[in-house]
Image: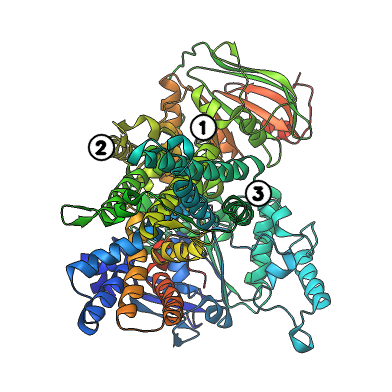
């Protein structure tokens, strides 16, 4: 064991077992799946994972804060519906491609609003976030069906659906957006006052209050951020599909939470980081992509992911329990 | 000691390292049957770690454990318990939602057929143990509803469920009242008479000298020697422990008091305290002395905005104020070092530096980002000033030794440069060296013009640090003493609710 403690790379991997896992499956698929290791496919992976990735960033914030948000899939669908629908409103019919702008802005605002409502209820009523956002998940999904009349909306403006194929230099625009979001949230969490207080509130709420930290506003900001990111994710998803369907984003909350937990964020709050979450998101992305290339039926992905989730968390506990001081078995 | 007898338990050359820390460095230790063996050392010396090795919670890197002549390997607390080694933790480890009975028999609930819990037997046995401990609550109550002291009793009751060979008490008296302590000492002497070996860890010299037969001293994870209690004295033990003698005198320099910083008039919170009036001037230390439960902590919490008084007035620096929240209190320059560091003071997963700067991070920024440099500067300053022992600022606060955790909390509030500093039981669980440093520090702070309130249940502590002492009993201020007129007897009388003729 002493040797492990001394090698900095191994130590880092022990603290972030998910990255060890990402490395292993990366090498595995590179060797065994034909088209896996190509620039194009790797970019593909980033684009494919950016949707759950963006939400996972927000979920990391919310979970470190000691809460959870189950309503992200529904918020995503609602935002996508707004984004696609609003651009065809008569009011903007003469705006040309600019009609996309109010549509996207409104969609993002709707996401922030949903988050704000969640946050406000959790703050003011003190009801557990699990319950509040479970209600929101059902309620918002209901709203989506009412709004869309159970139909899909299709984007009439082709500039909208072309957006997702754009590139900036060698990089797909979606990958760039995701990259920027990763950096921004990482900085927010590790370098700002809000980030620090997010850890404090999730780690020990009473101590945070005693330190003069206003718990409610921080929780609200984090819910608004995840609402924004879910909406952004919904907008981007609808550009990829050129449409918004009422069932968009089903089960996303489960994928997102899986990715975040794989990345080492604790459900009890106070612990976690964006580097881990990125690893969790990539692990899911690589697995799905690689197994797809190897033509493994999709449901095996679930079986394998489920096993990996447990395995990674087990390793994490093995390696890191002394460091946590949490020894009682 | 009878040389012919086997030790109940012996540790040889124990080494235990954590990343960055050599917590134990070749420690030898033994307990004879029927002996009370005290273990002493500064905060972070490795006492709790040694005991966790003994109780099967940590695996030593090197060294061996010998029980009744047999070399053993214990990998879990359950195995240790089976060997008759029982550890009563420094930090409570109870399940708060369960009843006292369930906690006492946790993991070994008596059963009926089909694995059903035999509640009757469970409660009968638990109540019998609690009775033996002279506890005045029943085993059916939920632990969360018990006071800290009573929770401690439940923890002790656990040890009495099996035939113990060795029972380890890790700072058991930190939150007990004097009366409860007497009960505890009776129990320890009972166990001793039954031939059980006792390991007793405490920072209180008086307890160690009344209770123990031998004393082993650790320093920085190293073994410093074992002494017969009868052949040694406090000074020798202290020097072994911290490398120097202690100066326990009061600093008698004449004080100049400034204007009144805090003035409390007829403050009432029904059921907790009533009609409380006192004032604290700049440069003055006011000690609040009383029994646990006298309402002192509640007054502190009210001043810090955690409780709302039903009537009365609070003036800070001459102005009447409403203190609605800790945030408001901090803005007015009031700081509180709370009684209970783990629950109220620290974010355990967070590193030491971040814990220390928590109430002021919003002021330690460079542009939109936190300034690492400014944060580290504060951490380094108070680490040195309070002699906090940690391998680096990155260490999470949860793994520090109890005393060092307390110092982090004190450092946190000192670094806020408050006008009024309230410290609630500031030296609970702190070693004698640091304790006298903290006392000196409180005096220095006052000398620099802070108004300081010290709440303490230890008479020597209030006598040493205070300029004035407020004695409380059942939520009322019984009497105020200036340090020149106070005597131990009059203090004891005042906090027991006895009003003598002189107390007019
Ligand atoms: N799980 C852990 N991980 C890392 N370091 C640890 C861990 N447990 C203890 N330490 C370190 O080991 C040293 C010894 O700690 P220990 O708790 O044994 O001290 P102690 O003598 O009981 O002190 P106190 O009187 O304050 O309770 C300390 O420096 C502490 O920070
Ligand atoms: Mg200890």
Residue highlighted by disc 2: B373
- Do callouts 1 and 2 point to residues on the same chain? yes
Q: Position of residue A107 (x, y in %)?
A: 46, 44
| Viewer-closest of B12 and B80 | B80
| Residue at position x 31%, y 40% in the image | B384
The residue closer to the viewer here, A224 or B224, is A224
Q: Chain for mark 1?
A: B
In this rendering, do the residues under marks 1 and 3 share a single chain? no
Q: Nearer the viewer, mark 1 or mark 2?
A: 2
CA gap between label 1 and label 2 equals: 37 Å
* Residue under numbered circle 1: B464
Q: Is residue A190 visible?
A: yes
Determine the image quadrant of residue A51.
Answer: bottom left
Between the C-alphas of marks 2 and 3, the distance is 39 Å
Secondary element under disc 3, as helix, strand or loop, is: loop
Q: Which mark is residue B141?
A: none
Relative image position of residue A13 (x, y in whole percent): 28, 68
Q: Nearer the viewer, residue B208 or A25?
A: A25
Residue drawn where x is 69% and y is 55% of the image: B144
How many residues crowd mark 1 within 10 Å: few (<14), some (14–19), many (20+)? some
Q: Which residue is mark 3?
A: A127
Name which of mark 1 and mark 2 comes first in the sequence.
Answer: 2
Element at label 2: helix
Few, some or many residues within 10 Å of mark 3 (<14, 14–19, 20+): few
Residue B110 pos. (x, y %) = 74, 80
């Amino acid at each position: 064991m002493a040797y492990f403690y001394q090698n900095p790379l191994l130590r880092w991997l022990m603290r972030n077992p998910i990255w060890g896992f990402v490395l292993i499956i990366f090498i595995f698929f590179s060797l065994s799946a034909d088209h896996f290791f190509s620039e194009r496919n790797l970019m593909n992976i980033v684009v494919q994972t950016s949707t759950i990735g963006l939400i996972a960033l927000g979920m990391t914030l919310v979970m470190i804060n000691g809460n959870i948000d189950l309503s992200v899939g529904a918020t995503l669908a609602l935002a996508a519906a707004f984004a696609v629908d609003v651009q065809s409103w008569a009011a903007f019919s003469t705006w040309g491609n600019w009609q996309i702008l109010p549509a996207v802005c409104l969609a993002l605002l709707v996401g922030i609003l949903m988050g704000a409502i969640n946050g406000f209820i959790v703050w003011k009523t003190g009801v557990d976030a699990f319950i509040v956002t479970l209600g929101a998940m059902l309620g918002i999904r209901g709203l989506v069906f009412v709004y869309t009349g159970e139909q899909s909306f299709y984007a009439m403006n082709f500039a909208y659906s072309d957006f997702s194929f754009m590139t900036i230099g060698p990089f797909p625009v979606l990958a760039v957006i995701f990259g920027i979001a990763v950096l921004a949230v990482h900085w927010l969490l590790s370098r700002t006052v809000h980030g620090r207080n997010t850890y404090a509130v999730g780690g020990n709420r009473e101590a945070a209050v005693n330190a003069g930290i206003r718990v409610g506003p921080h929780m609200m900001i984090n819910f608004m951020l995840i609402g924004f990111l879910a909406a952004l994710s919904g907008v981007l998803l609808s550009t990829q599909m050129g449409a918004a369907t009422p069932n968009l984003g089903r089960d996303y909350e489960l994928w997102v939470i899986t990715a975040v937990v794989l990345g080492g964020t604790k459900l009890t709050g106070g612990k976690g980081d964006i580097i881990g979450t990125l690893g969790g998101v990539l692990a899911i992305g690589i697995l799905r992509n690689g197994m797809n290339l190897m033509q493994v039926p999709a449901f095996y992905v679930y079986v394998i992911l489920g096993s990996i989730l447990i395995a990674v968390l087990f390793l994490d506990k093995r390696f890191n329990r002394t460091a946590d001081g949490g020894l009682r078995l | 000691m009878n040389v012919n007898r086997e030790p109940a338990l012996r540790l040889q050359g124990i080494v235990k390292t954590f990343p960055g820390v050599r917590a134990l460095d070749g420690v030898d230790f033994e307990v004879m049957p029927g002996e009370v063996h005290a273990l002493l050392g500064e905060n972070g010396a490795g006492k709790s770690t040694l005991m966790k090795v003994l109780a099967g919670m940590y695996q030593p890197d090197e060294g061996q454990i010998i029980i009744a002549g047999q070399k053993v390997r214990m990998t879990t607390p359950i195995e240790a318990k089976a060997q008759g080694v029982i550890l009563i933790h420094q930090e409570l480890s109870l399940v708060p939602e369960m009843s006292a009975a369930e906690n006492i028999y946790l993991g070994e609930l008596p059963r009926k057929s089909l694995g059903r819990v035999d509640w009757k037997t469970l409660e009968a046995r638990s109540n019998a143990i609690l009775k033996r401990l002279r506890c005045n609550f029943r085993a059916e109550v939920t632990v969360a509803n018990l006071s800290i002291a009573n929770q401690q009793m439940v923890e002790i009751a656990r040890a009495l469920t099996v035939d113990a060979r060795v029972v380890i008490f890790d700072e058991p008296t930190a939150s007990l009242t004097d009366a409860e302590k007497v009960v505890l000492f009776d129990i320890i002497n009972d166990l001793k008479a039954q031939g059980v070996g006792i390991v007793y860890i405490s920072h209180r010299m008086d307890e160690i000298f009344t209770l123990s037969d031998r004393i082993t001293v650790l320093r920085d994870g190293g073994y410093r020697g074992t002494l017969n209690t009868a052949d040694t004295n406090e000074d020798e033990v202290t020097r072994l422990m911290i490398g120097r003698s202690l100066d326990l005198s009061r600093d008698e320099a004449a004080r100049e008091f400034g204007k009144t910083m805090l003035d409390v008039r007829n403050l009432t919170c029904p059921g907790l305290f009533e009609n409380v009036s006192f004032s604290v001037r700049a440069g003055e230390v006011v000690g609040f002395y009383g029994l646990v439960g006298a309402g002192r902590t509640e007054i502190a919490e009210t001043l810090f905005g955690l409780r709302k008084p039903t009537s009365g007035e609070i003036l800070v620096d001459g102005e009447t104020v409403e203190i609605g929240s800790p945030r408001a209190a901090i803005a007015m320059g009031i700081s509180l070092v709370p009684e209970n560091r783990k629950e109220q003071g620290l974010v355990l997963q967070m590193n030491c530096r971040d814990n220390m700067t928590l109430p002021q991070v919003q002021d330690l920024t460079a542009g939109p980002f936190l300034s690492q440099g400014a944060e580290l500067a504060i951490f380094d300053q108070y680490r040195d000033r309070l002699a906090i022992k940690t391998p680096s600022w990155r260490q999470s606060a949860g793994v520090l030794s109890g005393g060092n955790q307390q110092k982090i909390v004190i450092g946190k509030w000192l670094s806020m440069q408050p006008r009024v500093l309230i410290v609630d039981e500031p030296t609970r669980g702190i070693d004698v060296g640091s304790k006298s440093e903290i006392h000196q520090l409180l005096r220095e702070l006052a000398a620099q013009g802070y108004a300081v309130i010290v709440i303490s249940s230890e008479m020597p502590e209030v006598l040493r640090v205070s300029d004035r002492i407020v004695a409380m009993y059942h939520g009322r201020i019984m009497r105020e003493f200036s340090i020149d007129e106070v005597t131990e007897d009059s203090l004891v009388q005042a906090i027991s609710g006895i009003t003598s003729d002189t107390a007019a």
